[in-house]
Amino acid sequence: MNPNRRTFLRQLASVSAALASASWLASIGYSQTTRSVARAVINRARIRADLDRHILGSFVEHLGRCVYGGVYDPGSKLADASGFRKDVIAEVKELGVPVIRYPGGNFISGYHWLDSVGPKKDRPTVLDRAWNSIETNQFGTNEFMDWCKLAGAEPLLGFNFGTEPAEMAAALVEYCNIEKGTKWSELRRQHGYEKPHNVKYWCMGNEMDGWWQIGHMTARDYGRKAADSARQIRVIDPNAKLIACGSSTPELPTYLEWDREVLEECYDVVDGISLHRYFGNTPPTSGNSSARFLAMNLDMERQIHEISAVCDYVQGLKKTQKQLWLSFDEWNVWYRARSGDAVDGQRTFAPHLLEEVYNLEDALLVGGFLNSLMRQSDRVKVACLAQLVNVIAPLVTNETGVLRQTTYYPYSWALKYARGQVLDLSVTSETYPIKPDGLQADLAWGGDVPFIDVTATSDQQNNQVCVFMLNRDLEAERELVLDWRDVTPSRVLACETLTGPDLKAINTFASPTKVAPRPLDTPKVGATMTFKLPARSYTVAQIAM
Ligand code: AHR
């Protein structure tokens, strides 16, 4: 590595130390106060970014019971004539998930898309080596397109960069997006799909920096393969949005350097770069402290800043006007069902893998993640809650129906209420200290975290503002004053909160609404409005001007 780059990377790494500092919080509109009442100044003219609803996407992988038993279950009395679970479609439709990534994840790196198209009786049953599971290929690209239409979602498809050459990625684009008259488009027509699927967004492989990934390769090799594929794909579909595979976690020693090297190879021909992250409340990540855990959306935000910095560095090197956007195409809480039998299908079909049970504190942090993604939506243009059903998911099925896990609620609020533009708020909040001692390197920063995390969207068309408020105080209710500057609200249209006495409370089929939203008393409308946010809560308010 050339010494200048070494220095650059060292400097970039020191961004992490700045996370806890006032300057970091200032960059997202926060300042500290010793007063217990927090304040958010709302100026509708101060806009951070247009909200791209693609940041509210989700993810369906051939993994465990996500596809088989979740999305597709022809043996179920709840399935339609195509074998799709009607109750799951109804939930996804009601949520209004705008975009869904498919078919992996780790699965994709050993998957042959050609095995899962055409007559179902001719499709091979294979061993998926990512999850040691049996894959029947009865659900594939075309079924996913049909399912997306029913669910009202746009597909975000991935390429197998592990065991397939660039040619097969190009072939998939041709199969999906060319109308007719070529080898692969005619094959699609033979398969009963006369019209092209017109898929816009594509992930160029999955976590290729990870030692666990089938076909794991060096950043240079990956970057060259991505560039080669992108050039071929642009001939087939010049409008394709191509997402290069970025670092899959800050825990890897190649973090940031992977992104730099990849982008040095393919910057000019891709549109975005991916990042992934899963968080947990464990001894090495939070010291089992819920207060530290609830600050982890700030770690997500730091990661966004770091990857953006690498993109901009390569932009500078290339002397180009083109700026890349980020695709945070896997994010969630995931730490319980993460080893042993929970990740090993033991050569069975639709095994119970990654069936994480979410509690109240997980839901509060998911609310925080959504606040962060909205706040960073000037740079993040795609993001996917991983995953949608049964596998680390807000929705869980059994033979009788669907359960909404705790994390369903903050996600459903963002989907329902976040519209228009993300506002640039000035927030003052009392803070609490967190300590780095004993935590793994990427989370070992100490500093002060605001009790109140707030973000807001403004829908000019309907003349409404939605405010999303996380109270990280585990003990006490906190007041948040909304201080309206260039408009005065006329009415609170909706206000709900998710809270409870027990951070570890969960929903089950026997007790499905143990953690569920309840209405929150709304303040009198006016130029200032004081919300009383319960301890341990995430709250949404929809306010008409
Ligand atoms: O979402 C579960 C897995 O996590 C995905 O398959 C992989 O991409 C990530 O490591």
Image (cartoon, rainbow, N blue to C red):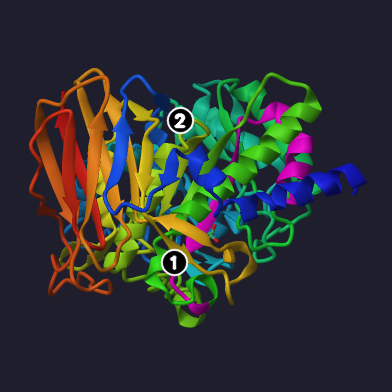
In which quarter of the view is residue 545 placed?
top left
Q: Is residue 3 above or below residue 289?
A: above
151 sits to left or right of 138: left
Q: Residue furthest bottom?
A: 340
Tell me if residue 200 is in the magenta stretch. Answer: no
Bin the neighbour count of mark 1 within 10 Å (Cα to Cα): few under 14, some 14-19, many 20 and up: many
Q: What's under tag 2, amino acid-wise?
A: Arg
Q: Which mark is residue 292?
A: 1
Q: Is residue 259 magenta?
A: yes
**Is 525 or 144 nearer to us in this picture?**
525
Name the mark nearer the viewer: 2 or 1.
1
Kindly report the distance in space between the C-alpha atoms of the residues bearing marks 2 and 1. 54 Å
Q: Specify the segment rendered in magenta.
A: 257-283
What residue is pinned by disc 2?
A: 189
Q: Identify the element where label 1 is drawn.
A: helix
Mark 2 vs ligand 1: CB below 8 Å: no
Which structural element holds mark 2?
Answer: helix
Residue found at the very far front of the displayed protein: 34
Look at the picture and state if 340 lies above or below 50: below
Please tell me whether residue 147 is drawn above or below residue 356 in the rendered image. above
Residue 349's x, y, as percent? 42, 71
Q: Which residue is nearer to you in this view: 500 or 162?
A: 500
